Amino acid sequence: MQIGILNEPSDLRVALVPDVIKQLIDRKNNVLVESNAGVQSSISNDDFQASGAEIKDRDSILQNLDLLISVTPPAAEVYAKLKPHALVISSFEPFNKPEVAQQLASTGVTALSLDMIPRITLAQSMDVLSSMASIAGYKAVIVAANHLPRYFPMLTTAAGTIPPAKVLVLGAGVAGLQAIATAKRIGGVVEAFDTRLAAKEEVESLGAKFVMVEGATDDKDAGGYAVEQTDEYKQKQQALIQAKAEKADVIITTAQLRGRPAPVLLTAETVQKMKSGAVIVDLASSTGGNCALTQDNETLDVDGVTIIGNSNLAEKVPMHASQLFSKNIFNYLKVFVSEEGELNLDLENEILKSSCISHDGAARYGN
Amino acid sequence: MQIGILNEPSDLRVALVPDVIKQLIDRKNNVLVESNAGVQSSISNDDFQASGAEIKDRDSILQNLDLLISVTPPAAEVYAKLKPHALVISSFEPFNKPEVAQQLASTGVTALSLDMIPRITLAQSMDVLSSMASIAGYKAVIVAANHLPRYFPMLTTAAGTIPPAKVLVLGAGVAGLQAIATAKRIGGVVEAFDTRLAAKEEVESLGAKFVMVEGATDDKDAGGYAVEQTDEYKQKQQALIQAKAEKADVIITTAQLRGRPAPVLLTAETVQKMKSGAVIVDLASSTGGNCALTQDNETLDVDGVTIIGNSNLAEKVPMHASQLFSKNIFNYLKVFVSEEGELNLDLENEILKSSCISHDGAARYGN
C-alpha cells in the first residue's frame, strides 16, 4: 500500500514517526511524507528518509496514496485530489459533528474515525483518545505549575516553610488520573472528584483523596464514558465542588460527556470565591468547558484567577504525542492491512464496524 | 520607623507581604504601601490594609519614610524625593556595578545591599540570594518541562513505553540543587556537574549522578562562590560537558562567578550537537550566560534547541518569592531596628559592615 502523511501546520503533531514507518515498510508498504511534516515534532526530513520514507510534494502524495493518515481531519480540498476509494484515517468526531459521515461519503473515500474505535480490551493498543488524554492530563499540570504565582511542592528554607499547592482534579478518567499522578509528583496535595465510584480505587492508589457525592446515576452500561446526572445530585455536587474549589490553588477539569456539552462544574460564583493566583485548566473547553467562564483556546484572568481553556494539550507535547499516536495507528492498521501490505477491509470486524464511518459512498454513522 | 514600599511594575514581586508587615507593626513601625504594589504577587490593597499597612500615593510615601525597601534598585528620581539620611534596602550588585556605591553616596542615603550580606550561618535567614536562587532553580525546571516537546517522566502505555527525560544540571549551588530536586520529582534522570567536590554528597543525596573533572582549583576560601579554573582543567571540563550535553533533553545552567562574567560551559559547537527538541535554561544569562549562544531575557530556537536566558526566574513565582524575600528582610531588620522600632545602625556589626555600601555621603564599597 501507498501510505501518505501531510504537513499539518495547524497541529504540532505528525501522524507517523520514523520508528513506525520502518515497521510499515517491513510490512511491504511505501510511506510518502510531505516535506517538513515532522519539524514541529522535532523530526527532520532526514530522519524520515533514514527510516525509508520518501519525501514528496503534497499533490503527488495525494494523487498516489491508497491510505492517508492525518492527525486532524483533512480540509475539504484534500479529498478532491485523492484516488477514488482511498482510505482516510483521522479523528472525525461524528458524535459531535453529525453531518461529517455524510460529507465524507459524498467524497467517495472510506473514512476511518479513530475516536470511534470501541473501548474494548482488544483495541486498547489502538486507543488514540486514551493516549492523547494521558498526555493532556500530564501537560495540564505542567501548564498550571508554570502559570502559578506560587511554588508547587512544600519548601522548607531558613526563611520559613511554604506549604504544598492544593490541587483539585474534576473527572478521574485517563486525563484526570494522569493529572493526579503528575500533581503528586511535583509535590501537590491532591483531591479528585468523579461521579463514578469505580474511580475511587484508582484515585486513592495514586495517593490522592477521592471526593464524591452519594447517589450518582449508574454508568456501567456507558462504555467507560460518564453519564448525565439528576438535578438533585447536581446540586449536592455543586455545593461540594465549590467548597473544595475555594481552597484550591490549581483545578484541572476533565469531565466530558460524549456527544453532549460538557457539564458545568465550576460556576461563575465559584470562580469568584477562589483564591487570587489560582489556576484552572479546563480540558473540556472544546465542548463548552467544565467552568462556566472558560473560553476555548483562550487564557483569561478573572479577578486574579487564571482560566486556561484547552482541549488539545496533547499537541503541546508533540514529540511523544506523535509517537503514541503513530503506534496506535500501527496497531489499528494490523486489523485490516496484512503483513504483505494488502488491504483486507472486513466491515463485519468489531473494530472496523464501529470505526468505519463512510464506505463506498455511503455514510455508516448517524443514519 | 516609617517603612515604605513601592509598586515596582518592572518586577512581579513585592518587597513586603502582609504577614511580615503585621510583625513589623507589632514592633512599633508604620508601614506605607503604594497602591497596587502587590497585585502581581496576588496581594490586594485590602490584604495590605488588613495587615495594618497604610495605602498611600507614591510621593507622600517617599517624603515620609525613614526606610525604603525595594526588590529592584530604585530609579534615580526616587532618591531626590527622600528625606536626608533615609535608608534604602535593595540588591544593588556593587560587585557587578563598581560605580553604584559612589552614586548612592552622592544622594546622601544609607544604602544597604542585600547581596552583600555575608554568607555566614548567623545571616542564613537573611540570605535573599539563596532564597531567590532556590525558587529560580525550581522554576527553571518547570519552564523547561513546559517548553519540552517530550514527556518528562517515564510513561508506560498500551502503545509502548516512553523513557524519562535526561536532565543535566551545570553548577550544583542552591539553584542547581533545587533544579535537581525538581527534575527528579517530575521523573527525570539527572546528572549534575560542579567544580566543587563539596557538592558531590549533596547531589547524590538528591538521587542524581555527580559528574566532575579531577584537578579543580581549591575554592574553600571563596565564601561559597565558585572560583575560576585553569585552562587545562577547562579543556577537560569542556569535553566532558559536551559528551553529556549531546544526550540531554534538558540542561539547566547555574554557574556564576561573583563580579566576573559567567564561565562558558556550553559552546556553540556543543549546542549544534544537541538533540532537536532539547531545552537549555541559562540562569547565568545576566552575566553573559553559561551557554555561548544565550541572550539575556530572550528565548531562542537554534536548529531545534530552545535556549532560554533568564537570571531572574524567581520573579516568575512572585507570591512565594515575595514571601521569602520579605521574611529575609524582616530577619535582616532585626539586626539594626529594635523591638521598639528604633534604628541602631552599628556599622561595626559583621553583617552591616559588609552590606552597608553607602553611609553619610561616603561610599563604603570599591574604594
Image: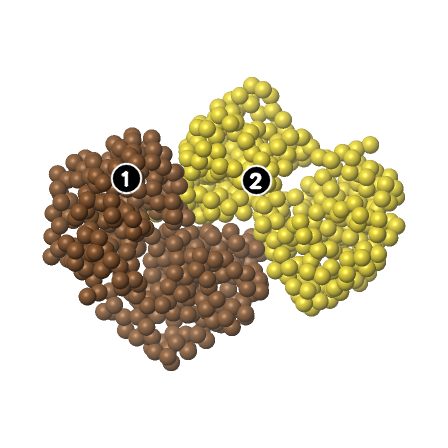
Chain colours: A brown, B yellow
Residue appearing at x 20%, y 36% in the figure: A30
Give percent across and percent down for residue B105.
Answer: 84, 41
Q: Quadrant of the N terminus of chain B?
A: bottom right
Out of B77 and A358, give the one closest to the viewer: A358
Residue appearing at x 38%, y 54% in the figure: A312
Of helix, strand and loop, which one carries label 1? helix
Of helix, strand and loop, which one carries label 2? loop
Label of residue A98 in the image: none
Label of residue A59 in the image: 1
The residue carrying pointer 1 sits among few (fewer than 14), some (14 to 19) or many (20 or more) residues within 10 Å by Cα, namely few
Q: Which residue, given by chain and number where applicable, does mark 2 sit on? A: B298
Out of A239 and A62, give the one closest to the viewer: A62
Give percent across and percent down for residue A181.
Answer: 40, 55
- On the question of residue A120 being in view, the answer is no
Give percent across and percent down for residue A266.
Answer: 46, 69
Residue appearing at x 32%, y 72% in the figure: A228
Establish whether labels 1 and 2 are both on one chain.
no
Q: Which three-letter amino acid code belongs to the residue tagged 2?
A: Glu
Give percent across and percent down for residue B136.
Answer: 58, 45
Real-space Cα separation, disc 1 to disc 2, in angstroms? 39 Å
Badge 2: chain ID: B
- Of tags 1 and 2, the one toward the viewer is 1
Out of B107 and A359, give the one closest to the viewer: A359
Residue appearing at x 62%, y 32% in the figure: B288
